[in-house]
Structure formats: structure tokens, C-alpha cells
Image (tube, coloured by chain):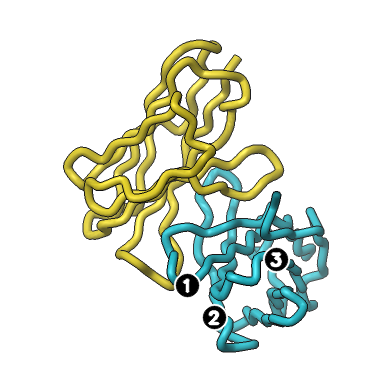
Chain colours: A yellow, B cyan
Amino acid sequence: DTGVSQDPRHKITKRGQNVTFRCDPISEHNRLYWYRQTLGQGPEFLTYFQNEAQLEKSRLLSDRFSAERPKGSFSTLEIQRTEQGDSAMYLCASSLAPTEDGYTFGSGTRLTVV
Amino acid sequence: DQQVKQNSPSLSVQEGRISILNCDYTNSMFDYFLWYKKYPAEGPTFLISISSIKDKNEDGRFTVFLNKSAKHLSLHIVPSQPGDSAVYFCAASASHNFNKFYFGSGTKLNVKP
């Protein structure tokens, strides 16, 4: 078990470009979560999946954001037409659902929009 | 509007002494609380949790206290060790929705040798 993997670790992009991040959860975990953390703040919920179904989305997830988990395994988070305000750490987590023991987080993808 | 607040951005404690990290919440629907620890360049890791049916939960050097009437919880670390130096986040959820946690902004703990 290698834990939750996120790729890339860092991404610098120009404003207006599209970016895509990948998350590989712990293999037996059927729930997958995306959170966003901006500087000086705690993680904020974006969305979660149970298997391949996206069951809840935050209002933070504007129409420029889309997340998929096509086969119930890895997930991608795409941001279209990036803005400077999208600069943040994007955290992925997974769990056996639902759980009282919190999630297992990945190390995150740090996005910088210039 | 932040529903979970950690009003102390940082805390410095001498090794061997007690560290007390505080957290306040506003949503009375929250009935499950967790603490996460985060080292630089790593994701948060689960530390300890407490349900609202309890007012205390212990795990080794870590104890979480919950005061429901004050909507306040605290994490006590005794004795503090230099390896405890990290950012600590509290998080809360309503028990019907463990899929969505609300996090505080974190407290950076520095344990001095």
C-alpha cells in the first residue's frame, strides 16, 4: 500500500490555460475526495466520489472545474481557463466509506497561476 | 463564513511541557470532530477524533476535550516532543455526513528542545 498518490506535485501555469491533476487513491478505498487549501487556511471541501459516482459538489467548484473518476479507481481534477485565484494546494484523499477515522490524504498538488 | 475556527495561528512550547491547541465551532449540527497533523510537503494525517457523546478521548500523549455547550474543543499533548512540531488542524462534521469535513485554519506548533 503506497498511500494516496497525487501527480504532479507542483504545477505552474499561465492564466487562461487548462490544467489537469491526477489522484490515485488507496486501492481498496471506494471513496475519493478533493479538497483545496489556500495559504493560511485549512482544507476546503470540493467534491467526493463513491466508486465512479460523483455524489456531492461544493459551490466552490465553479463551472470551470470538473472532476472525474471514470472507473472508480483514479480521479482527475481539471481546471479550465485558470485564474490567479485558483492558486492553491489541491488535496486528494480516500477512505472506506463512510468512516469515523478521517481520510488518508495525499501530499497534494500545488498550483501556481501566473 | 468559517464554521470552524482556530484563533491561534502559532504556539511555541518547551519540550516536555504541555501543548494546548484550541478550536471553536459555530454549527450546532456538528457532532464529530477530528484533529489532523500536517508536516511540510506532506498531506494532513489523522491524529485523534471525538464524538459529541463523549467529552474526552485519549490516545497516548494526545487527549481531545469537547465542551459542547461552549462549542469548543482542545487538543492536549503531554509531554510535548520536538517531533510534534507541525501544523494542527481541527475538523468537524455532522455524523450523517462523514464525507464532508469543515477544517479550521490550523495552528503551527513549535516544540523547542
Q: Residue at x 58, y 55 (%)?
A: B38
Q: Nearer the viewer, residue B37 or B25?
A: B25
Task: Choose between B82 and B91: the one closer to the eye.
Answer: B91
Q: Amino acid at mark 1?
A: Ser
| Residue A1 visible to an observer of this rendering | no
In which chain is the residue bearing label 1? B
The residue sitting at 59% across, 52% down in the picture is B39
User: In the image, what residue occupies the spot 51% across and 18% down?
Assistant: A82
The residue labelled by disc 3 is B25
Q: Amino acid at mark 3?
A: Tyr
Labels 3 and 2 within one chain: yes
**Type of amino acid under label 2:** Ser
The residue indicated by pointer 1 is: B95
Specify whether A82 is left or right of A67. Answer: right
Comparing A86 with B59, the one in front is A86
3 or 2: tag closer to the N-terminus:
3
Question: Dot 2 lies on which element?
Answer: strand
Contact between labelled residues 2 and 1, with CB atoms less than 8 Å apart: yes
Question: Regarding mark 1 in the picture, which secondary structure is present there?
Answer: loop
Q: Is residue B99 left or right of residue A51?
A: right
Q: Name the residue carrying label 2.
A: B51
- On screen, residue B8 versus residue B39, left or right, reads right
Lower sequence index among marks 1 and 2:
2
Whether residue A70 is visible here, answered yes or no, is yes
Q: Which corner quadrant of the image does residue A6 belong to? A: top left
> Which image quarter: residue B59?
bottom right
The subunit letter for the residue under badge 3 reads B
Residue B2: numbered disc: none
Query: For mark 1, does the 10 Å Cα neighbourhood hold few (<14), some (14 to 19), or many (20 or more) residues?
Result: some
